Amino acid sequence: MDIYYPDNLVEGQHYPVLVFFFGGGWVMGHKSKFKPHAEYFSERGIISVLVDYRVRSRHKTTPFEALEDAKSAIRFLRSNAEKFHVDPDRVIASGGSAGGHLAAATATVDQYNDDRDDMRISPKPNALVLFNPVIDNGPGGYGYERIGEEYLCFSPLHNLRKGAPPTIMFLGTEDHLIPVETAQYYKKVMERIGSRCDLYLYEGQPHGFFNFKYREYYDKTITKAAEFLVSLGYITK
């Protein structure tokens, strides 16, 4: 983990924590992908954490180990809340693409836990900020050829239950991996179970449009994400 603290950190005070999971299909990627986001939100008063996790190219692992690691990361931060100045009741999970899946799955999926973890500590975040996330692993969704029938207990869309945390989601209308209809259906299900889901669609934008190198859309999405966190009372305007 790389941890970015607010400059004006006050000893003894606890802060919201925003945990980022990089994309790359659970195959590749690096935690530095969300460094600009982490720097921005740390300046807004949120502890920001870039998490590494096991991927196939470096560790010869499957998506299931990636989810175990994502849950372990949140449990680790909660179990060390005093050390890291973290408010364990204001944990935000975030990520892009497959990292967005990991963020959403920590909130929705009960299976795939590292048996070395303290299971008494919840891995479920209190809010989600999702950038073109993989939310459907079913037969018509992303990754089914690797997930198989385990999609029923691995796919966030198939595991939405009452109590799912408030969520904001960003998606380009020309994303070749995540159909707009999938995101719209996810929002509909979230609202049916009584959870907030803010969906922002960006006309003509492809997969990965939110990254820092696309500065216009980086700015647009990070501004909306900040407004979302203001609305939850996690940061001030």
Image (spheres, rainbow, N blue to C red):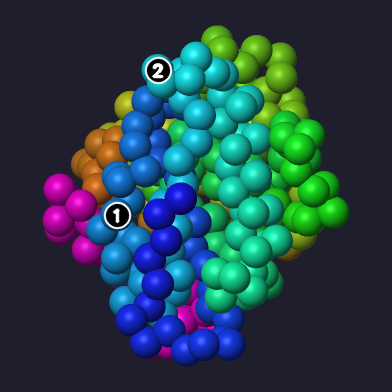
The residue at the point 60 percent across, 38 percent down is: 69
The residue under label 2 is: 57
Q: Quadrant of residue 217?
A: bottom left
Residue 61 drawn at (x, y percent):
54, 18
Could you tell me what secondary structure mostly forms the magenta stretch? helix
Between 95 and 197, the one lying in front of the other is: 95
Residue 83 drawn at (x, y percent):
59, 70
Query: Is residue 63 located in the magenta-colored stretch of the structure?
Result: no
SS type, badge 2: helix
Is residue 129 in view from this perspective? no
Q: Quadrant of residue 27?
A: top left
The residue under label 1 is: 35
Looking at the figure, which quarter contains the C terminus? bottom left
The residue at the point 68 percent across, 23 percent down is: 151
Between 111 and 203, the one lying in front of the other is: 111
Query: Is residue 227 located in the magenta-colored stretch of the structure?
Result: yes
Which region is colored magenta?
Answer: 212-237
Badge 2, how many Cα within 10 Å: few under 14, some, many 20+?
few
Report how far apart the C-alphas of labels 1 and 2 lie in the structure. 21 Å
Q: Is residue 113 left or right of residue 61?
A: right
Which mark, residue 163? none
Between 215 and 106, the one lying in front of the other is: 106
Q: Quadrant of residue 113?
A: top right
The residue at the point 55 percent across, 47 percent down is: 103
Residue type, mark 1 in image: Lys
SS type, badge 1: helix
Residue 30 drawn at (x, y percent):
34, 37
